[in-house]
Image (spheres, coloured by chain):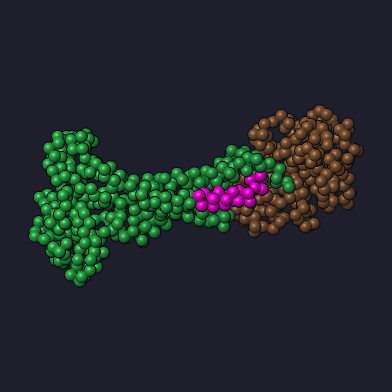
Chain colours: A green, B brown
């Protein structure tokens, strides 16, 4: 009977295509919006992931990575003295304005790294040498800074500009993941960063640390909290904290959640209605099958097979279209778009729900169907 | 036989007819069926008694709304009855569960409808194979038997045609092949010629008579069409939910 069910489904091409379009649209909408949403969330914690360090020591009241709350300069040594800590280095992070030779001003995020180790440096360098940061007045930029500040004709290795009236010379351009605010990132050494910024009582933004291999990270983090009274997080936990802050304070979650929910509801409505119509219009045929000895369970299996066949096809086409959209619009990280397997799994589960509900409506109709309909 | 009140027929498994003992295929006693409820309830069958014998083709005739199709549906086990007894092919339909009745129907009955009710997405051979597939026959064997049956009804060269590419008469032939493919003992036909013109209707009835009738099978045909009365052995006339007469059909002598 599976054969008959599939022939009935594919035989009515117009209805089949309409069903397929409904489900494809629903899947594409959910995957596309979900991927953009997740891409944005990943961007929101790029300032953490770009530095790629295991432990962040912060002000105890920190809400998210871009809301810097300076801590005492002595914190680095205090963290280093805690058992289980392998190393700890200072990090400066703050907003400043850069003045280019052409007179333009650009707001930048200044990131000061430990000069000796350059811990927190980007993994990939596109131009120049990151180690040259130790030279006088040296700074490095990320590729987004080059783009935002005028492009490679204006900013390249060797270009000079001013930070707070002090000279900065570009020695390297690194590749990083775009941040949520997309403010250009300028890297330099910690000490030079302090020279660029106006003097404040507290200048240390974060302490970056690593636990010894023999020490459990969670225990070391707890020790840091106990010994310093500060906040301490793994990079993951700090990232989630930042994502949580963005979701709570920006309305992005509600906006995207609404769109994803709409995709689900619209998809379900289209699929449910079309599938119900498909069944109703084939009611005489199902009645004939019932009269010829097909049980309600057999017809239910046929309906489920039809629903899941069109569902899985719609899933594949929808994912494909969403992926093409991502490839075309989010090339080189220009737009936030991150298709992850949990999202695809979630969409598959949502689709199964859509198909099951649509099929159930039809099955209920069929269960109540008197085969005598064929004689009317 | 005259007006049907059951007295002229045997209450047992056999009856005398035309000098020979005939086995009863369908026995209906006191059948009542209503639609609706309360003040709007309409009683369509008001105590029907009827026997149908193996080897015969019985015509159910009468005015529109007289209850012919309702009686046919009840005998076929596709409509629940309110009261009475239905004994079909030696089994009591009245006491069968819906599931058992469905399986019984699939095993023992063939259906021919006014509107053919072919599945438009399936070829003629696939349509004929449907009852076999429902019974669990393997697809290859079912299709093979479907093609053979189509040859029997004169459509051996149309086995792979879709219904929309067949004429009305050809579609009804496919439906007949489908009704006979699982060798049913009871063939129920609802207005099988209503959607066909006169000559095609005659041909279809000839076919139903030729392939449908057999000593171990009986055929019940609901019809309005007086042009096909000649194909029946007996005619039961229903009016206002009652059988008002059962007549043997006299065929004109041929030269």
Residue A123 magenta-drawn? no
| Image coordinates for residue B150, horizontal then vertical, percent | 66, 50
Residue B34: image quadrant is top right
Q: Residue furthest right?
A: B2
A265 sits left or right of A286 in the view: left
B145 sits left or right of A112 in the view: right
The structure residue drawn at horizontal position 79% and vertical position 31%, both measured from the top left corner, is B84
Q: Could you tell me which quadrant the N terminus of chain A lies in?
A: top right
| Image coordinates for residue A200, horizontal then vertical, percent | 16, 52
Q: Nearer the viewer, residue B244 or B41?
A: B41
- Residue A129 in view (yes/no): no
Q: Nearer the viewer, residue A27 or A107?
A: A107
Question: In the rendered structure, which segment of residues is drawn in magenta?
Answer: A265-287
B195 sits left or right of A177 in the view: right
The structure residue drawn at horizontal position 79% and vertical position 41%, both measured from the top left corner, is B40
Q: Nearer the viewer, residue A346 or A114?
A: A114
Q: Residue furthest top?
A: B12
Q: Main secondary structure of the magenta part?
A: helix
| Image coordinates for residue B54, horizontal then vertical, percent | 78, 36
The structure residue drawn at horizontal position 80% and vertical position 48%, both measured from the top left corner, is B223
- Residue A111 in view (yes/no): yes
Q: Residue furthest front?
A: A201
| Image coordinates for residue A8, horizontal then vertical, percent | 58, 50
Residue A274 magenta-drawn? yes
The structure residue drawn at horizontal position 28% and vertical position 55%, both measured from the top left corner, is A179
The answer to whether B233 is drawn above or below residue B19 in the figure is below
Q: How many numbered marks does the figure carry?
A: 0
């Amino acid at each position: 009977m599976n054969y008959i069910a599939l022939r009935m489904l594919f035989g009515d091409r117009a209805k089949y295509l309409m069903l397929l379009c409904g489900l494809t649209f629903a899947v594409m909408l959910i995957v596309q919006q979900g991927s953009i949403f997740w891409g944005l969330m990943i961007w929101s914690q790029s300032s953490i992931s770009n530095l790629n360090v295991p432990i962040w020591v912060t002000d105890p009241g920190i809400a998210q990575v871009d809301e810097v709350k300076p801590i005492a300069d002595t914190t680095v040594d205090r963290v280093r003295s805690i058992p289980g800590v392998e190393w700890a280095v200072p990090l400066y992070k703050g907003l400043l304005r850069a003045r280019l030779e052409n007179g333009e001003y650009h707001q930048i995020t200044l990131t000061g790294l430990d000069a000796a180790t350059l811990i927190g440096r980007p993994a990939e360098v596109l131009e120049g040498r990151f180690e040259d940061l130790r030279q006088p007045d040296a700074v490095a930029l990320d590729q987004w800074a080059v783009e935002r500040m005028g492009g490679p004709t204006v900013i390249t290795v060797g270009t000079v500009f001013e930070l707070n009236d002090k000279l900065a010379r570009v020695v390297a351009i690194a590749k990083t993941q775009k941040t949520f605010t997309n403010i250009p990132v300028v890297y330099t050494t910690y000490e030079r960063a302090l020279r660029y910024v106006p003097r404040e009582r507290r200048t240390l933004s974060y302490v970056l640390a690593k636990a010894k291999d023999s020490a459990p990270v969670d225990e070391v983090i707890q020790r840091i909290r106990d010994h310093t009274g500060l906040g301490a997080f793994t990079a993951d936990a700090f990232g989630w904290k930042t994502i949580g802050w963005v979701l709570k304070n920006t309305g992005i979650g509600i906006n995207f959640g609404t769109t994803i929910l709409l995709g689900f509801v619209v998809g379900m409505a289209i699929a449910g209605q079309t599938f119900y119509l498909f069944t109703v219009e084939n009611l005489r045929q199902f009645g004939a099958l019932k009269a010829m000895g097909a049980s309600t369970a057999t017809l239910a299996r046929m309906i489920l097979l039809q629903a899941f066949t069109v569902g899985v096809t719609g899933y594949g086409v929808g994912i494909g279209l969403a992926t093409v959209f991502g490839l075309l619009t989010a090339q080189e990280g220009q737009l936030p778009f991150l298709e992850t397997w949990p999202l695809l799994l979630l969409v598959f589960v949502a689709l199964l729900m859509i198909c099951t509900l649509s099929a159930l409506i039809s099955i209920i109709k069929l269960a109540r169907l008197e085969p005598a309909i064929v004689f009317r | 036989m005259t007006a049907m009140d059951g007295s002229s027929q045997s209450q047992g498994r056999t009856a005398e007819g035309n000098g020979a003992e005939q086995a009863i295929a369908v026995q209906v006693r006191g059948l009542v069926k209503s639609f609706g409820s309360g003040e709007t309830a309409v009683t369509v069958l008001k105590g029907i008694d009827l026997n149908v014998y193996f080897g015969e083709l019985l015509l159910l005739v009468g005015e529109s709304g007289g209850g012919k199709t309702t009686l046919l549906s009840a005998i076929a086990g596709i409509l629940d009855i309110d009261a009475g007894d239905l004994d079909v092919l030696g089994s009591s339909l009245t006491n069968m569960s819906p599931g058992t009745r469905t399986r019984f129907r699939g095993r023992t009955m063939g259906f021919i409808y006014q509107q053919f009710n072919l599945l438009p997405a399936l070829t003629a051979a696939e349509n004929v194979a449907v009852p076999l597939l429902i019974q669990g026959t393997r697809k290859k064997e079912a299709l093979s038997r479907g093609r053979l049956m189509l040859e029997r009804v004169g459509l051996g060269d149309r086995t792979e045609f879709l219904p929309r590419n067949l004429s009305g008469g050809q579609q009804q032939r496919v439906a007949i092949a489908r009704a006979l493919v699982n060798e049913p003992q009871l063939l129920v036909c609802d207005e099988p010629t209503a959607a066909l013109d006169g000559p095609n209707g005659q041909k279809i009835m000839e076919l139903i008579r030729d392939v449908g009738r057999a000593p171990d099978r009986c055929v019940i045909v609901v019809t309005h069409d007086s042009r096909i009365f000649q194909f029946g052995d007996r005619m039961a006339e229903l009016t206002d939910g009652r059988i008002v007469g059962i007549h043997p059909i006299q065929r004109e002598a041929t030269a």
